[in-house]
């Protein structure tokens, strides 16, 4: 079984607490895939931390452990509103080409979708455009409303290293602790990032 701390530990050095939490989440995601209750909200993971701490590598290993395809989206490439629309299948008048996330999820509905450095994306992606799929598990193509993707079995991974000093300070105080206050700090931090970007 690849979904063990030992399997990840042989391929990833350090971050024992994060690895344990990830393994638990992946096991839950694998169990959900066996349930016939689609559509439902997909499994969502947020990886916070300073640059170089292995966030992207953990997402790659998650896809390998689950034996699923990895769809990697460099969110710096989606910093404008036009690019954000392209990701979801923009209307014909605005579409600069390319394959939308809707198309990719229709082709591989159980993919691990990595939104790498989500803080560099246009704010509407997380604040508006992903709202439906994150809550209902369904994504509709913006050009052809008849095309929908069922993302119930997908795994969405968001990484962020914005406000690196705050992240590092929180990590020093709460590293490897299963602490409700620590999780609350992470949640408040992420919400504040996007509220400030929208402002």
Image: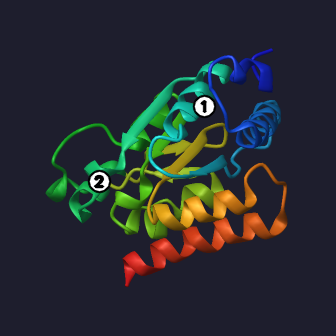
Residue 109 can be seen in this image: no
Residue at 64% over, 64% down: 170
- Percent coordinates x, y for residue 29 in the rendering: 75, 37
Q: From the image, state whether disc 1 or disc 2 is nearer to you.
A: 2
Residue at 60% over, 31% down: 110
Q: Is residue 95 above or below residue 6?
A: below
Q: Is residue 54 above or below residue 195?
A: above
Read off the residue under disc 1: 110
Label 1: element kind: loop
Read off the residue under disc 2: 78
- Percent coordinates x, y for residue 197 in the rendering: 38, 75
Q: Residue 67 versus residue 130: which sits nearer the camera?
A: 67
Labels 1 and 2: the sequence-earlier one:
2
- Percent coordinates x, y for residue 126 in the rendering: 47, 63
Left or right relative to 199: residue 47: right
**Could you tell me how many numbered marks the image carries?**
2
Q: Residue 125 versus residue 96: which sits nearer the camera?
A: 125
Q: Is residue 176 above or below residue 61?
A: below
**Alpha-carbon neighbours of circle 2 within 10 Å: few (<14), some, or many (≥20)?**
many
**Alpha-carbon neighbours of circle 1 within 10 Å: few (<14), some, or many (≥20)?**
many
Left or right relative to 76: residue 171: right
């Amino acid at each position: 079984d690849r979904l063990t701390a030992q399997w990840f530990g042989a391929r990833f050095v350090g971050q024992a607490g994060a690895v344990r939490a990830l393994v638990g989440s992946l096991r839950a995601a694998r169990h959900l895939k066996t349930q016939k209750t689609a559509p439902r909200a997909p499994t969502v993971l947020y990886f916070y931390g300073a640059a170089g701490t292995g966030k992207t590598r953990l997402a790659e290993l998650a896809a390998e452990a689950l034996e699923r395809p990895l769809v990697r989206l460099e969110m710096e490439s989606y910093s404008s509103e036009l690019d954000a629309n392209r990701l979801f299948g923009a209307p014909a008048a605005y579409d600069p080409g390319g394959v939308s996330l809707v198309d990719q999820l229709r082709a591989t509905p159980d993919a691990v979708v990595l939104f790498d450095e989500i803080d560099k994306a246009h704010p509407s992606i997380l604040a508006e455009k992903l709202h439906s799929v994150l809550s209902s598990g369904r994504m509709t193509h913006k050009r052809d409303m008849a095309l929908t993707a069922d993302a119930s079995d997908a795994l969405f991974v968001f990484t962020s290293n914005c406000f690196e000093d705050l992240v590092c300070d929180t990590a020093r105080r709460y590293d490897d602790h299963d602490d409700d206050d620590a999780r609350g700090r992470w949640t408040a931090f992420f919400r504040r990032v996007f509220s400030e970007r929208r402002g």
